[in-house]
Image (cartoon, helix red, strand yellow):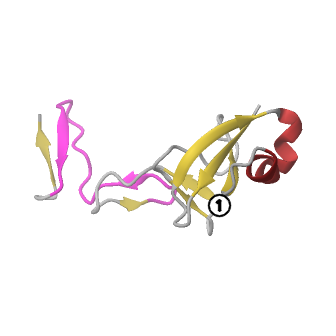
Amino acid sequence: MAHFAQIDENNFVVNVLVIPDEQEDRGQDYLAVDCGLGGTWVQTSYNNNIRHRYAVIGGKYDANRDVFLYPQPYPSWTLDSNYDWQPPVAHPDDGNLYVWNEAQQQWDTE
């Protein structure tokens, strides 16, 4: 089975569907035309074999990098070179449980 993500005009993922393997090579046309779903469809990989990771609803497709991104957890977080969101302050590694405090830009203990 092949997986395809529907992206909106802002490249946000709004749907992810599975199609038969025999339609994989024409996934965009199969979903948009044959199935009558319209829109733009981009193949994604459940095993993260293509486009870096599996598309998730609410995530985004970065067409310039040809990767799917997870939703940004907080406005202050930035993408690293591996397309993972990183906080402006490293997470403490002391065994305690922390939650990110966006207003204070710090990690607070739970």
Q: Is residue 22 above or below residue 34?
A: above
Residue at numbered disc 1:
66
Hey, which residue is sitting farthest bottom in the picture?
64
Residue 25 location, x and y as percent? 86, 47
Q: Main secondary structure of the magenta part?
A: loop
Residue 101 falls within the magenta-colored stretch: yes
Disc 1 packing (10 Å; few <14; some 14–19; many ≥20): few
Q: Is residue 54 visible?
A: no
Residue at the (18%, 38%) spot, across then down: 98
Task: Give the position of the C terminus as an image quadrant.
Answer: top left
Residue 56 falls within the magenta-colored stretch: no
Q: Amino acid at mark 1?
A: Asp
Q: Is residue 99 visible?
A: yes
Residue at the (54%, 52%) spot, across then down: 13
Q: Nearer the viewer, residue 81 or 35?
A: 35
In the rendered structure, the answer to whether residue 30 lies left or right of residue 102 reads right
Q: Nearer the viewer, residue 15 or 81?
A: 15
Residue 1 location, x and y as percent? 77, 31
Q: Nearer the viewer, residue 78 or 21?
A: 21
Residue 85 location, x and y as percent? 39, 54
Residue at the (45%, 52%) spot, across then down: 84
Q: Quadrant of residue 80?
A: bottom left
Start-end of magenta stretch: 80-102
Residue at the (65%, 51%) spot, across then down: 51
Number of marks in the rendered image: 1
